Amino acid sequence: MSMFRAKKLDLGSFVNVKVIRDHTKRKVFAENEPERQALRYIIRNLALPQRTRVQAQLQLAQMHCYTRPTQIRNRCIEGGKGRGVLRDFKMTRYNFRLNALAGKLPGVKKASW
Amino acid sequence: MAVPRSRILDLMKVQCRIFSHTFNPEGQRLGNKVLRQRLKGPALASYYPRKMGTYKDLQKAYPEWEVINEEEEHRREMLKIIKARGKGAPKKKRTAEESKKFKNKKRAAERAAGTAT
């Protein structure tokens, strides 16, 4: 959503619209996380009155989808791809291979046995 | 030697006070596990590397020096060559009429193709 997007591009990695979107979602989630956790606490607390808990449930469900952590997906910083991304290197398997063979990833060595 | 339950509860109460836990002998669901969770927002938000140290910043920091961005120079040079050969991008259409002209042409061509088949 454009209302959340940064006015000026602040990414140094590979950029396409999906990467920008994911980055925006991450920032929005970080901003709204305390509120979400507070609502979650109210919902899970059985000692509170039923009415309060239902209200909290509704409020949590009505928050914007960009504030949800499940919307976030790790994407490749080299090519923006969303599948086959190695979490440790933030890269797809192919980009990882290229970088590893070029010796750009410290501590990574091709094994053979 | 059996210890009465009340004694154990007292002990638990003191234990909870010292270690700042919530005293909850009945095991009720109070949602404290949500409060105990750490915020993972900052870690998630710093996934992508941020932009830093661009040529523009450098130029701004040292206005008395001239900064040469080789990639940008190369791009401009190539553009010049392309334009000289007449292969550059067309000019932006400013008015609605100008943009309509092209559309009609396209449609007319389509119509002609439709009648031919």
Image: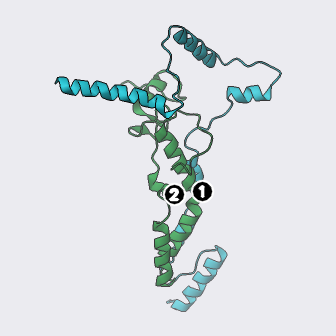
Chain colours: A green, B cyan
SS type, badge 2: helix
The residue sitting at 72% across, 30% down in the picture is: B57
The residue sitting at 42% across, 34% down in the picture is: A92
Q: Residues within 10 Å of mark 1 (few under 14, many from 20)?
A: some
Cα separation, mark 2 vs mark 1, equals 8 Å
- For badge 2, the amino acid type reads Thr
Q: How many marks?
A: 2
- Relative vertical location of residue A3 with respect to residue A10 in this rendering, above or below: below
Left or right of A24 in this view: B66? right
* Quarter of the figure that contains the C terminus of chain B: top left
Residue A50 image point, x, y percent: 46, 83
Chain name for mark 1: A
Question: Quarter of the image holding residue B56?
Answer: top right
Q: Nearer the viewer, residue B23 or B74?
A: B74
**On residue A31, which mark appears?**
1
- Relative vertical location of residue B2 with respect to residue B65 in this rendering, above or below: below
The residue sitting at 58% across, 37% down in the picture is: A11
Q: Residues within 10 Å of mark 2 (few under 14, many from 20)?
A: many
Farthest residue, direction right:
B64
Chain name for mark 2: A
Residue B87 image point, x, y percent: 48, 13
Q: Which residue is mark 2?
A: A67
The residue sitting at 49% across, 60% down in the picture is: A64
Q: Are marks 2 and 1 in contact (CB under 8 Å)?
A: yes
- Relative vertical location of residue B45 with respect to residue B106 in this rendering, above or below: below
Q: Looking at the image, can residue A20 be seen?
A: yes
Q: Looking at the image, can residue A96 be seen?
A: no
- For badge 1, the amino acid type reads Glu
SS type, badge 1: helix
Left or right of A113 in this view: A105? right
Residue A94 image point, x, y percent: 40, 29
